[in-house]
């Protein structure tokens, strides 16, 4: 049997006849006319080389062959219907789903409280999983569907990974309250270089953007501490004379919860943009689209608060 020549509607007609045991009832069940159902039965008989349904009294009884093929055909139609239901537009109110997002701890700190608030009111059965952004493998994880979205700063992305800019970031300085480098709320370049610094880095080195800017001026700072975690910095800075540069969206959190003050770094430093990236394969997926729109909405709120 050449399956490419089979009309799926014939299988739907078979299901209706098997369940209704009546040409008229089957026609009504799938909303077609009785002549069309009779024609479908004729094509089914030709296809399976069997009568399939024989009139016995007032009922169309299935033949042995119809009884033999019915369970698998009916199950197949159930699977097809279930698949099509899953393709319906995403409804956050009733959806049961897990979203996995890759991002850094500091961006999660900014995004997560608001995301959870929205999930509680709009998508109460959605669960969230956060993972770190592994620069070497996150593209593969997105492509394989293990991650819905990654949020951070990305370059040299393949063409099948789409990107949306969310907001711009820049560095601000932090130091303990009453730090001797602060004069009238500002820090001079000389004072900025004179005191030891803490540096966040994932590369296990001791050089950052600020060091490159200082080198252009023939200056060098002392990196007394490097850390791979943003949130180890506040208590360390609050208890020492160390200075650190942090992304601006951490400023309010750090100065609100710790004995810290922020200042403008006395250098011309470039800002950078925070983006979300996702697979082109999921660009029109309604669940992924809803998540992207939610993150974009929250990012606009973050950008306003960080200005």
Image (tube, grey):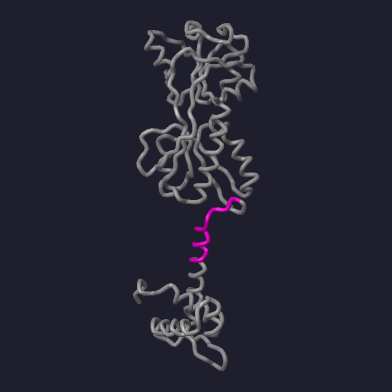
Q: Residue at 35%, 71% (x, y): give it.
A: 4
Q: Is residue 128 above or below residue 25?
A: above
Residue 129 relative to residue 269: left or right: right
Q: In the visual, does 71 lie left or right of 159? A: right
170 or 131: nearer the eye?
A: 170
- Image quadrant for the N terminus? bottom left
On-image quarter of the C terminus: top right
Q: Nearer the viewer, residue 92 or 239?
A: 92
Q: Position of residue 23 (x, y in %)?
A: 52, 85
Quarter where residue 208 is shown: top left
Name the spot of residue 43 as percent of width and height, x first.
41, 82
As drawn, 214 above or below 113: above
> Does the magenta segment cover residue 83?
yes
Residue 206 position (above or below residue 9) = above
In the rendered image, residue 55, in percent from the top left (x then y), is placed at 52, 91
Q: Position of residue 111 (x, y in %)?
A: 57, 35
Residue 217 is one of the magenta-drawn residues: no
Residue occupying the far bottom of the picture:
57
Q: Which residues are magenta?
A: 80-92
Which residue sits at x=54%, y=92%?
56
Horizontal placement of 225 versus 213: left or right? right
Quarter holding residue 259 = top right
The residue at 62%/51% (across/down) is 93
């Amino acid at each position: 049997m050449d399956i490419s020549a089979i009309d799926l509607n014939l299988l739907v007609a078979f299901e209706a006849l098997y369940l209704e045991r009546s040409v008229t009832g089957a026609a009504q069940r799938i909303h077609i006319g009785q002549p069309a159902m009779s024609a479908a039965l004729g094509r089914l008989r030709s296809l399976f080389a069997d009568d399939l349904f024989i009139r016995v009294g007032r009922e169309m009884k299935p033949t042995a062959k119809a009884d033999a093929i019915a369970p698998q055909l009916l199950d197949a139609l159930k699977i097809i219907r279930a698949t099509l239901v899953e393709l319906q537009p995403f409804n956050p109110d009733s959806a049961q789903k897990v979203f996995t997002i890759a991002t850094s701890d500091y961006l999660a700190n900014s995004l997560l409280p608001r995301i959870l608030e929205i999930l509680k009111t709009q998508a109460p059965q959605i669960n969230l999983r956060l993972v770190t952004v592994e620069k070497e493998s996150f593209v593969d994880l997105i492509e394989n569907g293990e991650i819905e979205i990654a949020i951070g700063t990305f370059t040299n992305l393949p063409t099948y990974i789409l990107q949306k800019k969310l907001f711009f970031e820049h560095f601000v300085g932090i130091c303990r309250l009453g730090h001797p480098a602060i004069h009238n709320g500002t820090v001079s370049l000389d004072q900025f270089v004179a005191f030891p610094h803490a540096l966040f880095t994932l590369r296990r080195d001791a050089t950052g953007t600020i060091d490159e800017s200082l080198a252009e001026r023939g200056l060098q700072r002392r990196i007394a501490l490097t850390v791979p975690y943003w949130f180890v910095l506040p208590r360390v800075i609050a208890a020492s004379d160390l200075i650190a540069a942090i992304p601006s969206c951490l400023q309010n959190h750090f100065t609100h919860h710790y004995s810290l003050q922020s200042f403008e770094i006395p250098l011309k430093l470039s800002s950078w943009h925070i983006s979300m990236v996702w697979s082109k394969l999921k660009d029109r997926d309604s669940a992924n689209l809803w998540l992207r729109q939610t993150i974009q909405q929250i990012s606009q709120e973050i950008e306003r608060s960080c200005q």
